[in-house]
Every structure is written in C-alpha cells, then in structure tokens.
Amino acid sequence: MLYQHLNSENWRHIFIVGDLHGCREKLNEALRVRHFSADEDLLISVGDLIDRGPDSPGCLALLKEPWFRSVRGNHEEMAINALSKGNHHQWISNGGEWFYHLEGMAMMEAKHAISRCRNLPLILHLQLPERLVVVAHADYPLPHYAWGSAVDEEKVVWSRSRIERLQQGKGQVITGADAFYFGHTPLSAPLEAYNQHYIDTGAVFGNQLTLVQVQ
C-alpha cells in the first residue's frame, strides 16, 4: 500500500512518535505522561519500530492495537527482505540480530508481525479539521504533495537528501499539504524547517523519544 487516508474526527487526541527501534518501555512511559487513552486517542509512528533497542517484539505487537498506525520504515523493509529474499546480512548488520535469537512461538509471532509490515503504507494522509498532515519515514520526494501521486518508493523509505539540504540552509516548502512528519535520521533535537518536521531524536541511543500532539 502506498497511501493510507485517516480522518481525524475518529479520535480525540492524535500523536505522532519518532523512530522507536525497540524502545517500547520509553513509548509506554511517554504515553502515560500524556494521559493517552487507548479508547479515544490515536498514535501514528514514522516507522522503524524494530532493531537496535531492547524490545523489538514489543514494538511489533503495536501493529495489532486498534489505536496504532504506522508507515513502513527502512528497518521494516530490511526485515521483509531478509525473510522473503534471504538478504539476512544487511538486516543483521543494521540491528536485526535480535530476530535470530528468538525461538519457538516468539519466532513465529515475529515472522507474522514482519509479514504484516508488508501491508503498512509508505505515506499516511491525515486530514485534520483545518489542515492536512502527511507522515512518511524518510521523505516525500516531490516538490508538491497530492494524494495518490506516483513517487520513488525507495526514496520515501531511505532518502536523506532533503534533510541534508535543510541542514545546509537550502530547504523549501513542500506544497500541497500543511505539515510533513519524518523520522529516519537521528538528531539530538527535532528539526523543524519550512513545513517539515524531523522527529527521530535517537531514543535508542539514550536520547528522548519525541512525541508530537497534532490534535
């Protein structure tokens, strides 16, 4: 699935969280602090639920929660490719070794969850009452956003060219939507420039997990 549409009227509060990388307990604590309600609220992830951190299976379990949505990150992509194409080395060398230590039912559940990641959208289109928010893992690699536009899917999941330009002071607005939320590139603090928000603050490396409330 390339695009998924969400209408904000279905939830009370909506939050977007940066790359989790197995940091389920950090997420649980952040949601407690925000008085997150599993019955009324929605959490959206910018992807990279797994690898490097202490609890990748716990983060994959989020995919079964009705209050959770996510786009696919490059670490989910590596996991899918490892299991479907045998590209194990790339995943293991980027933090996927946890999977190969699992046994029995835990291994089966992780395989099923990674299979579900195939159905994750690359781009979430969140319609709020007064504005349109777009969520993708690494980039929306076009100058103008439009629902259903063909995009380079590899760039959506992997590209750092836009954030590198921003860091050099050469950015620009992406027209067609009010705000874009991305992860992928670990930063010491969220980077906000033009209408782009980069919210991977390296929780797995001991930094804060960034959780942004958009409704």
Image: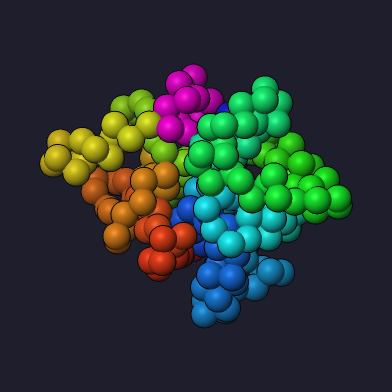
Q: Position of residue 149 (x, y in %)?
A: 48, 23
Q: Position of residue 186 (x, y in %)?
A: 36, 51
Determine if residue 97 is in view: yes
Exactly how many numbered labels are in the figure? 0
Residue located farthest toward the right when viewing the structure as drawn: 105
Left or right placement of residue 22 versus residue 185 in this view: right
Q: Which residue appears at 75% of the width and 51% of the height?
A: 102
Q: Position of residue 50 (x, y in %)?
A: 58, 50
- Residue nearer the viewer, 191 or 15: 191
Q: Which residue appears at 31% of the width and 27% of the height?
A: 143
Q: Position of residue 27 (x, y in %)?
A: 55, 67
Q: Which residue appears at 53% of the width and 32% of the height?
A: 90
- Residue nearer the viewer, 54 or 8: 54
Left or right placement of residue 25 versus residue 185 in this view: right
Indicate whether residue 14 is drawn in magenta: no
Relative to 148, say whether 135 is above or below. Answer: below
Relative to 102, say whether 14 is above or below. Answer: below
Query: Magenta segment range?
Result: 147-158
- Residue nearer the viewer, 27 or 133: 27
Indicate whether residue 155 is drawn in magenta: yes
